Amino acid sequence: MPSRRTFLAGTAGITTALTIGNPAHAGATNDKSDKSDKSDKQLRALISRMTLPEKVGQLFVTRVYGHSATAPDQADIDANLKELGVRTAAELVARYRVGGIIYFTWAHNTRDPHQIADLSNGIQKASLERQRGLPVLISTDQEHGIVCRVGEPATLFPGAMAVGAGGSRADARTLGRIAGQELRAIGVRQNYSPVADVNVNPANPVIGVRSFGSEPDAVAGLVAAEVAGYQRSQVAATAKHFPGHGDTSVDSHYGFPVITHTRAQWDALDAPPFRAAIRAGIDSIMTAHIQFPALDDSGDPATLSRPILTGILREELGYDGVVVTDSLGMEGVRTKYGDDRVPVLALKAGVDQLLNPPSLAVAWNAVLKAVQEGELTEERLDASILRILRLKAGLRLFESPYVSQAGVTRTVGTAAHLAAADRIAERTTTLLVNEGRLLPLSRRRHPRLLVVGADPASPSGTTGPPTGVLATALTELGFTATALSTGTTPSATTIAQAVAAARGVDAVVAGTYNVTATSAQKTLVEQLVATGKPVVAVAIRNPYDVAHLPSVRACLAAYSWTDVELRAAARVIAGRVEPRGKLPVPVQRADEPTRVLYPVGYGLSY
């Protein structure tokens, strides 16, 4: 790892001045203290020495393929050449002077914590040597639950809706603090979490269990708590997706959602979590690729809307931290304008960081051209760069850009952290149905179990298919549990196999995933019930499944199919812990969706 002396030489003597600035994060306050003023003066001086291409680069946060900054696998070199025109992360930094890099599992950035730390150090070394001593702000999407980029042996926590079911702000703060410590140890200093969207639409295909719930005040409290936890660990939290993505039936990755809330509804429903995040000192806020006519009737997505980002977020809410776009490769932001116009319009709207454009070359050159031709001014770029550098200084990246392998070993996936995640998970599992007190299952009456169900694509928080994880957990608790994967759309043959297997056991545990009225999963569960064997349904994603499963004698909501939540559900099924979770969203009747079957706050206990 490069020495501290090497780093100090690259910063042109500004390190000391920057690190004595406001110890709070850049977006935390509008502190006008002498120290803050001195830091800003030094940062402005640094900006004044940047060339225009260097300034443009600081605005971009991009993907890059490979586990190493300088020696990725050949397949990753090929992918980088095809998509970015460079071979490695080090070359990327040298060519485009990017201010940030985002890690993805699919880009092979996150094999294991020690490798991630080496990658982070390699990126920082390349940046410090090529960018006037400027460190890179490395980010990722580590929401926990169904969206994780860093898997085991890192500590994986329940997702947002599960935390909402637990209802504990202390747990949310603990999650943020521990997750932040582990991210910081591997060199990730900006996390695109928490989700601040209020999920009021059960059909929402993109938010759902990524939200804390449907009650604005409850979501606001948990968002603020998680922000405090992350930023206490010197990792920038990011509230997303402004101005609110919770009432959509279209996924902005693939379409262009429209929010029909009135301005009054936005104030009451969507805004409270973002207001709470700003009060908590949130470092960054991510935009949504949604159309919100009540806030801007131009038809532009919020990411490109000056009335929304400058008029509401900056001026009305008083936020002066970093604004980052959602991925510019998503269809929601590409529907109306070309890829060359999107980054320019985002900057004109008030954005600071341009995240993951589909073509970095097209986007980078478009911004450069816009300044050269007078559509954007250098002063406009300087304002965003100052916010970005304030954030880097607040995170002490100028002083401590590197991480150590000893720090990874000391911090990531410790026994204490893993135990905290298990305790939090135990407070989230929600018991919705328990006819005849079927649960907890008894090892005397139900020694042999069949675990069937959906095995959706696994997030990083899993070690295997959900049926296998659940069966293993139940076996470790004293049952003899056999796993049979039936998938999300079981065929008639698969259903028949499950029914035949059920006849040889004492009870069946069925993991369900987004069941609908016409779902083959519903048919599977109904035929299992018809065998006369007790059936316990475990909703491993949305809790709304229970409305379509009236025949089961017991039903739990686990809110995710990650290991930590499935293990907690197993302990509830076995009676090792009491079910304590309460629904953070209402569940409507399947036959009459305007009526509520189970209200917010509902949850049984033993």
Image: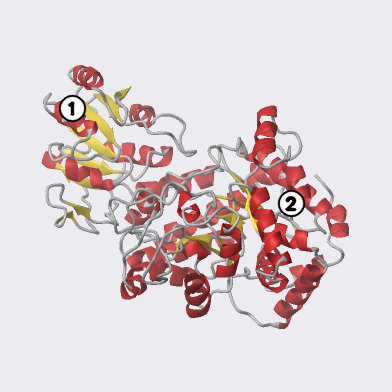
Q: Where is residue 520 in the image (x, y as percent from the top left)?
A: 22, 31
**Residue drawn at x 23%, y 36% as measured from the top left:** 537
On the picture, is 214 further left or further right than 326? left
Closest to the observer, 85 or 570: 85
Q: Which mark is residue 445?
A: 1
Q: Where is residue 465 in the image (x, y as percent from the top left)?
A: 40, 29
> In this rendering, does residue 148 appear at all?
yes
Instruction: Give the labeled residue for mark 2.
Output: 96
Nearer the viewer's eye, disc 1 or disc 2?
2
On the picture, is 251 further left or further right than 313? left
Q: Which amino acid does label 2 sit on?
A: Tyr
Above or below, comparing residue 404 to residue 463 in the picture: below
Label 1 element class: loop
- Count neighbours of disc 1 (C-alpha within 10 A) and say few if under 14, some if 14 to 19, many if 20 or more: few
Label 2 element class: helix
Q: Say which label, 1 or 2, has the lower sequence index.
A: 2
C-alpha distance separating marks 1 and 2: 65 Å
Closest to the observer, 347 or 70: 347
Q: Position of residue 319 (x, y in %)?
A: 54, 74
What quarter of the picture does the N terminus occupy?
top right
Q: Position of residue 325 (x, y in %)?
A: 54, 59
